[in-house]
């Protein structure tokens, strides 16, 4: 005998209600169409905006950040020296005309020791507000307006066996670093240029804290590019010095210390800067061994004014020979002050001779 499963009977009215409900839910209503249309439009607009955004190219800082993100090693690699392999002279930024010959004082025709005695002694001012470019101008301007930037001018001055690309750009040479007395072969390039650096003998930071805040912008640009304040030196010593003054740093080459201190004194006197008590004492100690070390005169100092022409002597006039004799000038020869044909009656070139 086959077993049958007994199913409960359903209420016909319930069955019809469920069927009707399923029938109604399966048909989309007007409200469903409206909501669906709005959602679709929003998705379409969003997708279009996203597509446009994806096609916008980043610029400036954003582009740099994007590149660094895509290539993690890019940020850690130093930028190439754009002039390392160029054969043409760069176009230096020319300093404004007023940036030259604006020194505070050109009275440095004396010894460094005597000049030190004219410099004020007081403590450092705060470093607040110091910023290299805004306060002292773009690095390595063409301050003397000779067509070459200051760095190449100093390299050409201090190196020997100089080779240039064009009229200005020094590409190689030999330096005997004054700070160490050690030779360095300079070859311009991304990995080699920094072996030779240009030192500000009075660092710009030190200058800012010892009076340069009171200088005009043109005077600070002159200070930053003045040849008496610049030396080609080995990069290692320049890094060790930092912004130190005589009290905190001196060259390891003792034979150069007198000349080095004389330069610092000359720069400070030229631009009206002061020295700290410790700096003054350290300078005095160094100059004790070389009391006759001369100070330096800035090439930016104006030429001394020519001596005035002597005033012309007043014209000598005698009313007659009696006046000549009273003055003790008789006789008067032709060409002498007071001679006149009126007094030389016989015309022999001698007046009042009788």
Image (cartoon, rainbow, N blue to C red):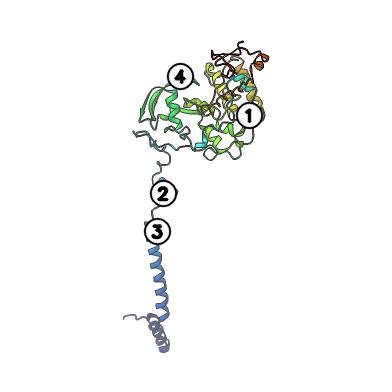
Q: Which of pointers 4 and 1 lies earlier in the amino acid sequence?
A: 4
Foreground tag (4 vs 1): 1
Foreground tag (1 vs 3): 1
The 10 Å Cα crowd at callout 1, few under 14, some 14 to 19, many 20 or more, is many
Residue nearer the viewer, 65 or 7? 65
- The answer to whether one can see residue 9 in this image is no
Q: Which of pointers 1 and 3 lies earlier in the amino acid sequence?
A: 3
Cα–Cα gap, marks 4 and 3 = 58 Å
Mark carried by residue 63: 2
Q: Secondary structure at mark 2?
A: helix
Foreground tag (4 vs 3): 4
Cα–Cα gap, marks 4 and 1 = 32 Å
Where is residue 304 shown, x and y percent of the image? 55, 26
* Residue ID for mark 4: 182
177 shown above or below 166: above
- Give the farthest residue toward the left: 1
Q: Which of pointers 4 and 2 lies earlier in the amino acid sequence?
A: 2
* Residue ID for mark 1: 274
- The answer to whether one can see residue 5 in this image is yes
* Residue ID for mark 3: 53
The 10 Å Cα crowd at callout 3, few under 14, some 14 to 19, many 20 or more, is few
Q: Secondary structure at mark 3?
A: helix
Q: Which of pointers 3 and 2 lies earlier in the amino acid sequence?
A: 3
The 10 Å Cα crowd at callout 4, few under 14, some 14 to 19, many 20 or more, is few
């Amino acid at each position: 005998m086959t077993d049958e499963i007994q199913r409960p009977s359903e209420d016909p009215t319930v069955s019809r209600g469920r069927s009707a409900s399923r029938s109604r839910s399966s048909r989309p209503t007007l409200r469903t169409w409206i909501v669906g249309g709005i959602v679709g439009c929003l998705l379409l607009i969003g997708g279009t905006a996203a597509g446009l955004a994806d096609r916008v190219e980043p610029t400036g800082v954003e582009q740099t950040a994007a590149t660094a993100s895509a290539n993690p090693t890019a940020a850690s690699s130093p930028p190439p020296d754009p002039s390392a392999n160029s054969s043409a002279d760069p176009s230096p930024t020319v300093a404004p005309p007023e940036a030259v010959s604006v020194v505070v004082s050109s009275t440095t025709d004396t010894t460094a020791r005597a000049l030190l005695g004219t410099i004020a002694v007081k403590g450092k001012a705060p470093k607040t507000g110091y910023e290299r470019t805004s306060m002292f101008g773009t690095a390595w301007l063409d301050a003397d307006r000779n067509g070459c930037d200051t760095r190449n001018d100093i390299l050409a001055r201090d190196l020997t066996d100089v080779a240039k690309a064009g009229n200005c750009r020094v590409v190689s040479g030999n330096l005997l670093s004054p700070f160490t007395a050690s030779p360095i072969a300079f070859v311009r390039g991304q990995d080699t240029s920094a072996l030779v650096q240009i030192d500000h003998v009075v660092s710009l930071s030190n200058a800012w804290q010892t009076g340069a805040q009171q200088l005009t912008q043109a005077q600070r640009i002159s200070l930053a590019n003045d040849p008496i304040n610049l030396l080609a030196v080995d990069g290692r010593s320049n890094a060790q010095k930092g912004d130190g003054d005589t009290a905190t740093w001196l060259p390891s080459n003792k034979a150069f210390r007198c000349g080095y201190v004389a330069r610092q004194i000359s720069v400070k006197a030229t631009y009206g800067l002061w020295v700290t008590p410790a700096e003054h004492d350290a300078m005095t100690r160094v100059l004790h061994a070389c009391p006759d070390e001369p100070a330096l005169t800035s090439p930016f100092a104006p030429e001394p004014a020519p001596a005035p022409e002597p005033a012309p002597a007043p014209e000598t006039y005698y009313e007659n020979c009696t006046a000549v004799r009273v003055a003790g000038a008789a006789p008067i020869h032709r060409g002498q002050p007071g001679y006149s044909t009126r007094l030389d009656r016989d015309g022999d070139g001698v007046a009042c001779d009788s």
